[in-house]
Amino acid sequence: MYRREVTLLPTCEETLVLPRKAKDIAQRLAVSTSDKPFLQADEAELLFSGWVKPDRFRIALRMRRPNHFIPLVIGTIEPTNSGCLVSLSYQLFPVTRYLLLGWTLFVLFGGLVSLLVFHNHLLAVIGVAILGLMHYVTRFNFQFQLRLTREAIHRVVA
């Protein structure tokens, strides 16, 4: 099951029904996860950075250089009689969320000041256009990185 909602900040949720045991899935994720955020020159190609515990994990795709639009994957692993359920929540990193919300509030405040104090409609419209462009670029880059992250997770747990 794959679900995307229309929200101010891009998010996505997914539930995987897998025929493997929960312990096996946690082990597969742990083997492909490093505690270092970026790829190191002298280490094997590990797909994710973060941490994995037997029943939950918090990982992100590893990159050679920083990318603020990589989804942070917060997941739980629940055992069932015939395998396990893996619930995944994809979201922006907290710092990226705070910066995006901060700039959104700043641009909205600037647009309101230009409209109410200076009676300048053009600056208010420019502020709204900048805000729309800012959120479009964020959503587009998040969706691009989401596709790469989902493919990597599906390869590991399959």
Image (tube, rainbow, N blue to C red):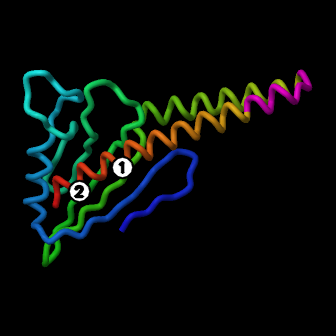
The amino acid pointed to by label 2 is His
The amino acid pointed to by label 1 is Arg
Secondary structure found at label 2: helix
Image coordinates of residue 137 in percent, x first then y, are 54, 37
Please tell me the numbered disc located at residue 136.
none
Q: Is residue 122 magenta?
A: yes
| Lateral position of residue 123 relative to residue 99, left or right | right
Query: Image quarter for residue 60?
Result: top left
| Lateral position of residue 150 relative to residue 9, left or right | left
Question: Which contiguous range is marked in magenta?
Answer: 118-127
Image coordinates of residue 59 in percent, x first then y, are 25, 43
Secondary structure found at label 1: helix
For the point 57% across and 34% down, the residue is: 101
Marks 2 and 1, how far apart at CA = 11 Å
Image coordinates of residue 88 in percent, x first then y, are 31, 56
The one of 37 and 113 positioned closer to us in this rendering? 37
First in sequence: mark 2 or mark 1?
1
Q: Residues within 10 Å of mark 2 (few under 14, many from 20)?
A: few
| Lateral position of residue 111 relative to residue 97, left or right | right
Height in image: 111 above or below 30?
above
User: Magenta stretch mostly in which secondary structure?
Assistant: helix
Image coordinates of residue 46 in percent, x first then y, are 14, 37
Residue under label 1, please give it. 147
Height in image: 46 above or below 155?
above
Q: Residues within 10 Å of mark 1 (few under 14, many from 20)?
A: few
Please tell me the numbered disc located at residue 154.
2
